[in-house]
């Protein structure tokens, strides 16, 4: 199922930075009306001032269920037909070294918010029989495990699995609603700063990730993996045991820990 963004109203979470910010810029260039959602209002207002399309700003902490519901209630009468879930974060380091509070907050944002927003947005679009949802997962979600970025990998595995399963269900139902999972590898954003780790030694720019994602969405691609080398790497893990793949990933993540 191909998809055309022209003139649509698009809701973007995590719009204040990184991939979410680039989606806002790219879709504004297509003439979309934007509803931007994030915690940092100042950044969204600055971005809105750079874009030549109508922009609504919703400040929300999506790790809280009531805030997710407030966002849906706010947009419910505005004809939004596209939802792009970008909000999320990770924490580098051994699981036992993180506070349980931080990890639960990550689960609430990376999993619960995505699930709540996806389900409730679908309820808004079912009668119309059209629309699109893109959930930003990660190549991390396509791998067996990720030692030293452990909870993050687990949350993205949930998002990737949930989104791919939902896409197949909706296709079988001939719902007319596109659902896709974006699974990038390393991207040069604020992720590593928030995760308290060293910057990637290789990766893609958020601009390239978003450019690729939009092209694949427009062609109806359900699983989107930017970068030929990343696609090859994911394919290559099929020839490793789950234990060996997890060990290799853990070795790489451990090398990115900030030295005390």
Image (spheres, rainbow, N blue to C red):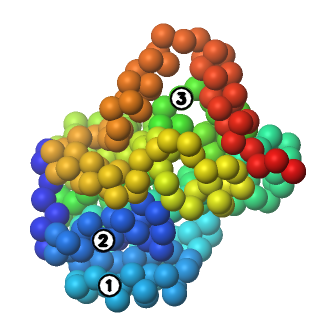
Q: Is residue 68 left or right of residue 7?
A: right
Numbered disc in front, either 3 or 1:
1
Q: CA distance from mark 1 to mark 2?
A: 9 Å
Residue 17, placed above or below residue 105:
below
User: Residue visible at 53% across and 37% down?
Assistant: 140
In which quarter of the view is residue 232 placed?
top left
Q: Earlier in the sequence, mark 1 or mark 2?
A: 2
Please state the horizontal and vertical placement of residue 37, each as a whole percent of the image.
Answer: 45, 75
Of the pair 126 and 191, the residue shown nearer to us: 191
Please state the horizontal and vertical placement of residue 122, each as a whole percent of the image.
Answer: 33, 59
**Residue identifier under label 1:** 50
For the N terminus, give its image quadrant: top left
Q: Earlier in the sequence, mark 3 or mark 1?
A: 1
Label 3 sits on a secondary structure element that is loop
Q: Earlier in the sequence, mark 3 or mark 2?
A: 2
Please state the horizontal and vertical placement of residue 157, each as a whole percent of the image.
Answer: 53, 38
Q: CA distance from mark 3 to mark 1?
A: 38 Å
Q: Mark 2 packing: few (<14 Cα in 10 Å), some, or many (20+)?
A: many
- Tags 3 and 2 touching, CB below 8 Å: no
- Tags 1 and 2 touching, CB below 8 Å: yes
């Amino acid at each position: 199922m191909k998809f055309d963004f022209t003139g649509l109203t698009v809701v973007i979470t995590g719009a204040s930075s990184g991939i979410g910010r680039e989606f806002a810029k790219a879709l504004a260039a297509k003439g979309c009306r934007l509803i931007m959602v994030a915690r940092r209002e100042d950044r969204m207002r600055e971005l809105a001032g750079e874009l030549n399309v109508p922009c609504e700003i919703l400040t929300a902490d999506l790790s809280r269920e009531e805030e997710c519901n407030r966002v849906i209630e706010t947009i419910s009468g505005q004809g939004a037909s596209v939802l792009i879930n970008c909000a999320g974060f990770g924490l580098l380091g051994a699981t036992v070294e993180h506070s349980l509070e931080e990890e639960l907050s990550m689960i609430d944002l990376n999993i619960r918010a995505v699930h709540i927003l996806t389900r409730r947005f679908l309820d808004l679009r079912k009668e119309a029989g059209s629309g699109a949802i893109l959930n930003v997962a990660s190549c991390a979600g396509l791998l067996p495990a990720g030692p030293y970025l452990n909870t993050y990998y687990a949350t993205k595995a949930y998002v990737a699995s949930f989104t791919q399963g939902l896409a197949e269900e909706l296709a079988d139902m001939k719902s007319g609603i596109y659902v896709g999972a974006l699974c990038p590898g390393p991207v040069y954003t604020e992720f590593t700063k928030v995760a308290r780790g060293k910057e990637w030694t290789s990766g893609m720019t958020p601009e390239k990730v978003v450019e690729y994602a939009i092209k694949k969405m427009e062609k109806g691609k359900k699983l989107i993996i930017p970068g030929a080398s990343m696609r090859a790497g994911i394919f290559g893990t099929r020839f490793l045991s789950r234990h060996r793949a997890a060990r290799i990933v853990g070795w790489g993540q451990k090398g990115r820990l900030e030295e005390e």
